[in-house]
Image: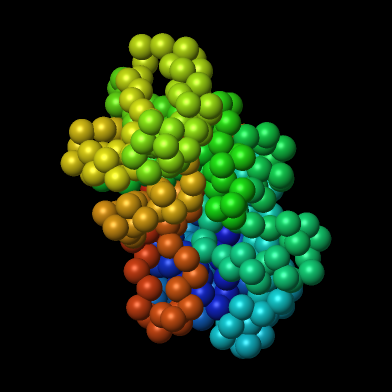
Amino acid sequence: MIVVSTGCPAGVGPEVSVAAAARLGRPCVLVGDHPTLVLAAQSVGVAETRLVPFTARGKKGDLHVLHVGPALRAADRARATTRAGRAQLAYVEVAYGLVRSGVGTALVTGPVSKEAVARSGAPGARRFTGHTEHLARLDDAEHPVMCFASPQLVTSLVTTHLPLSRVPRAITRASVSRAIVALFRLLAALSRREPRIAVCSLNPHAGEGELLGTEERTAIVPGIRAASRALGSQARLVGPIGAETAYRKAARGELDGVVAMYHDQATIPLKLVAFGSAVNVTMGLAITRTSVDHGTGYDIAWQGKADPAGMLAAMQLAMKLSRRR
């Protein structure tokens, strides 16, 4: 059973969650605000009668709803209020708990507003910078790795939601090695044998012989060597090479995966070639967790325009990865 935290009620999360769950053809639980999900069902053309309480014995095709969080008002569906921020965090934490306790097999998360959550005043919210980091705290996971998977491109990130000024210090031999090994494990779960993995440089042109920086020599090359020792002949590693070269080759099918040093180094090429079909995967947790690759979409929310394909892809990959676990 897939468990879905339905995201910000003012965004597209409720709509795409209901629409994708209706198409999935498998049991799932939608964690969120019940009246909001009823409105979402109406918006996307899903019969309200398909939404049943989580505790009820439903029939095939029913969408189970677990109502949690503060009672929402119309204003909370119009903009990301502090109440909506508290609600989003509650959805994530309750949904995680269901999966960790074994009630569900995988967690799929809808898009949230990091700002609304962080400013909501909920316990633990002040440190919220994204799902990856918050789930790691809930999970007691020491080193989660953010990854993305799509038919065109599979990638992992050495650092996640950090200010660019802090990225160089966070790139170490250990963090580079972990991102490589996590990407290998994801590729193995996707049935890629002996994958070809490129590791990006941090600096332009791989540092240009250290004219543009030394991180390649001091951190990235040692990280590649450590991962190579860990993986042996199971993977073919190359790098550090410029990100523009690595992602171009990967998009052409010459590589199976790419390790990026920081957030936008990965997400810009990913969303150029695979926006809407890519799935965010958190490796290193005790549970399977996937998510859509898009944000809250406030500009199109509650207009019936949101495409649920990304959420459906996240649900389908979650099922596949949970079976592989």
On screen, residue 259 versus residue 142, left or right, reads left
**x and y percent of residue 230 in the render?**
49, 15
Question: Please, is residue 12 above or below residue 313 in the view?
Answer: below
Could you tell me how many numbered marks the image carries? 0
On screen, residue 182 versus residue 45, left or right, reads right
Please state which of residues 110 and 218 is positioned toward the viewer in this rendering: 218
Image point (61%, 78%), residue name: 80
On screen, residue 171 versus residue 86, left or right, reads left
Image point (49%, 70%), residue name: 296
Res 201 quadrant in image: top left
Name, please, the residue furthest toward the front. 211
Q: Residue 272: in sight, yes or no?
A: yes
Name, please, the residue furthest toward the bottom. 74
Question: Please, is residue 201 above or below residue 19 in the view?
Answer: above
Q: Residue 199: in sight, yes or no?
A: no
Which color mode does the image show?
Answer: rainbow
Please state which of residues 110 and 100 is positioned toward the viewer in this rendering: 110
**x and y percent of residue 108 in the render?**
51, 52
Image point (51%, 34%), residue name: 215
Please state which of residues 210 and 181 is positioned toward the viewer in this rendering: 210
Image point (72%, 70%), residue name: 119
Question: Please, is residue 196 above or below residue 299 in the view?
Answer: above
**x and y percent of residue 162 in the render?**
59, 52
Please state which of residues 264 and 304 is positioned toward the viewer in this rendering: 264
**x and y percent of residue 66 in the render?**
63, 62
Question: Please, is residue 303 above or below residue 224 in the view?
Answer: below
